[in-house]
Image (cartoon, rainbow, N blue to C red):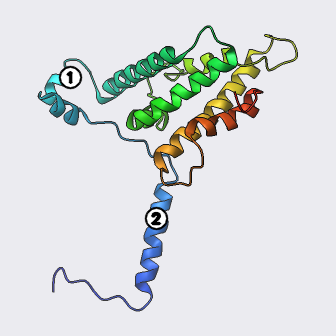
Amino acid sequence: MPGTRQRRTRGEGERLRAELVAAAIDLLLEPQPLPAPSLRAIARACGVAPSAVYMHFASQDALNYAVIAELFGRLRADLDAADPEAASPAERLDALLGAYLTWAENHPGAYQLLFERPDPLDTEGEGPGLDLLDRLARLLPDADPVPGTDPQARHATALRIWCAVHGVASLRIHKPSAPWAATARADARALVAGLAGLPAGT
């Protein structure tokens, strides 16, 4: 009878289940980019026809890049507002990382778009937002015996700090039910202290 499933012999169902899981894992070996809102969804949210979007953006990628640029601008504005410029570099670094974590907590979807998907292709070799790395590096103690002579070492340390703080921000978004024993900022302070050569209580 058409459309009727044939009964599987004993053990075949379990074997197929294992094959399905294995196939899904194989497909996940490559990174799966977080999808951005489609042009149609954005047009619908604005109450216009999809063709109207193309009057301003030539493609989905062009719109995505504009969104990413705007979100990085908003993140920078929050970091600027939280930066006590008259304070010590250690205090400014702590304030900067605290503002970063607060922004991630308050804008989880935007944070994922900025930091959990590949950079757009039309960035001419430099991903958007990498100026944040320079900002971190300027606040670090000198990473070499002769102050100021090894900017690469400072940037390497800054990138490790960013990795650590990103881990805190991302896991807080994706694993809210984990047994977090402290605040996100306290966890970040503990991780950053050793990397930046700062006391844990900074």
* Quadrant in the picture for residue 147: top right
Q: Which residue is mark 1?
A: 54
Disc 2 residue crowd, few under 14, some 14–19, many 20+, Cα 10 Å: few
**Residue 113 in the image: above or below residue 68:** below
Using the numbered discs, state the Cα–Cα distance from disc 2 to disc 1 in whole angstroms.
38 Å
> Looking at the rendering, in which quadrant would you find the C terminus?
top right
Which residue sits at x=58%, y=35%?
185
- x and y percent of residue 184 in the render? 56, 39
* Sequence-first disc among 2 and 1: 2
Q: Indicate left or right for 41 with 69 as reference.
A: left
- x and y percent of residue 189 in the render? 66, 33
Q: Residue furthest right?
A: 145
**Residue 129 in the image: above or below residue 184:** above
Q: Residue furthest bottom?
A: 10
Query: As rendered, which of 191 and 86 lies closer to the eye?
Result: 86
> Looking at the rendering, in which quadrant would you find the N terminus?
bottom left
Residue 173 is marked as: none
* Quadrant in the picture for residue 10: bottom left
Disc 1 residue crowd, few under 14, some 14–19, many 20+, Cα 10 Å: some
**Residue 130 in the image: above or below residue 5:** above
Q: Which residue is mark 2?
A: 23
- x and y percent of residue 3 in the render? 18, 79
